[in-house]
Amino acid sequence: MSTNKFTEGRLAQAALDRRTFVRGAVATALLAPLGGALAGCAVPSGGSGGGETAAGEMSADNPFGLVEDADVEAVIFNGGYGFDYVEFAADEAKKQFPDVTFEVSPSTQIAQELQPRFVGGNPPDLIDNSGAGSIGFNTIADQLEELDDVFDAPNYEGTTIADTLYPSVKDPGTYNGRFVALNYVMTVYAVWYSASLFDQNGWTAPATWQEAIDLGAEAESAGKKLFVWGKEAATYYQTMALDSAIKEGGDEVRLALENLEPNAWSHDAMQGVLEALHEIVQKGYFVPGGAGTQFTAAQARWSNDQDALLYPSGGWIENEMKDATAADFRMTGFPTPTVSDSPAFPYEAIRAGAGEPFIVPSQGANPAGGKEILRAMLSAEAATNFSETRLAPTIVRGIVPEDGFGSTALVSQTGMLDAAGENIFNYQFVDYYGLNADQLVVWNAFLSGDLDVKGVTDGLQKISDDVAADDSVEKIEVS
């Protein structure tokens, strides 16, 4: 079945909404050249924003020139990691700057709530630009502070921050040569299952899609499904499909997609994955009704009710579902299955990289304060707090102990990183161009059985083609 009229209408409206936002944000950038120009100037960050806060004296203890009685505002995406870990870091910063007021607020719709503030020239001092409603970086990159000075600063233990981090963590937050997004969490993307449930039934994690289909039949015999999804997270299956196709076909698949090339979604490797997923849908191995189910409710059918065996997600999943996970679940991850048993990258290859991007708008009233919260987050106390309470690694090395603070999911992430070795890849085009909202429409239709392989391919390719043809959207070339 090809795209139906209802899906066509939703997809067209989503694309219109995205293009309207992109053009509006670009216009904002043109109307506010002063903030962008000052972002690269050698002046204290506290003086490069909206002008409401004077610059303080810079020193080793105050590397960004934060004024003693300043007000600092941070808006944090309230998703899988919550937001109170930033409150914890702000409390650490408060110990260093007792007269500064740090205000940390949650949000679940970053673009919707903060786009008007970018337009008005009064954005917060720090933003966690995450979630399905995040702001496309191509629309705001020129309005953001460069963050190299955060890595060059000493942490609260007196060590240069750059020396405490995993390598290459600047890469995903660097746009056109400017490091403007500090990705805080070392995210591992995998397929997750209950090791205890698998042990009880003698099941093993599938290494290929055929093995996954066979496992679906075994799950059916046990009165369970293979997969489950919720409407806001349907594109988790896109991530899984992309990861699998890149492993199968190599870098040429990744580069074609990242560079918005024509027919990129028609690559043989991608088609092989989509055909496998379509077979799983057609065989009824998905819990039905996902397009009408809130995503955490759907995830609970996997983690708590155990109606489904597998769920694709980033390493945030354990923390996100910690209050809705069955006892002795022993959450464990494994690499995405491959189409064949001779892929371009080995089965152990994984998508992993720094994620959860934090940005400091140049037009904020106090960019120095935004950077100071980041400095606090990158110190040992706050990084340890995050890993222990969120059960996920940050970009700060040497924080997670061998027992993973008692987390099987955290232990398995470390194991997957070690097993992958150099076979680790990442991609940014979905976030950079803000494609997720449009792609959700296509994936919900595909997982519901309303689209066949041609339908999902055509729908996803059209989204990429529309962006490629839109001259108002600044493109990046990935090599």
Image (cartoon, rainbow, N blue to C red):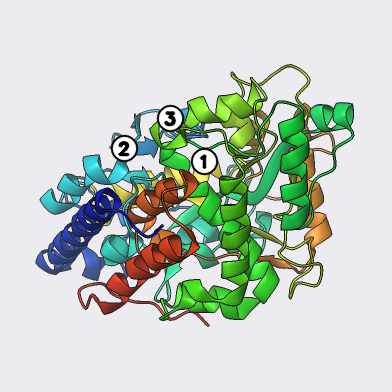
Q: Please name the amino acid that badge 2 sits on.
A: Val
**Closer to us: mark 3 or mark 1?**
3
Residue depicted at x 64% and y 32%: 318
Residue 146: x percent and y percent?
Answer: 39, 63
Mark positioned earlier in the residue sequence (2 or 1): 2
Q: Label 3's element?
A: loop
Residue 55: x percent and y percent?
Answer: 27, 51
Residue depicted at x 31% and y 37%: 72
Residue depicted at x 57% and y 68%: 271
Q: In the picture provided, is 180 more to the left or to the right than 416?
A: left
C-alpha span from label 3 to label 1: 38 Å
Q: Label 2's element?
A: strand
Choose between 134 and 204: the one closer to the eye: 204
Q: Residues within 10 Å of mark 2 (few under 14, many from 20)?
A: many
The residue that mark 1 highlights is: 376
Residue depicted at x 33% and y 69%: 462
Q: Is residue 18 above or below residue 227?
A: below
The residue that mark 3 highlights is: 293
Q: Residues within 10 Å of mark 3 (few under 14, many from 20)?
A: some
The residue that mark 2 highlights is: 72
C-alpha span from label 3 to label 2: 37 Å
Is residue 410 in view? no
Choose between 41 and 468: the one closer to the eye: 468
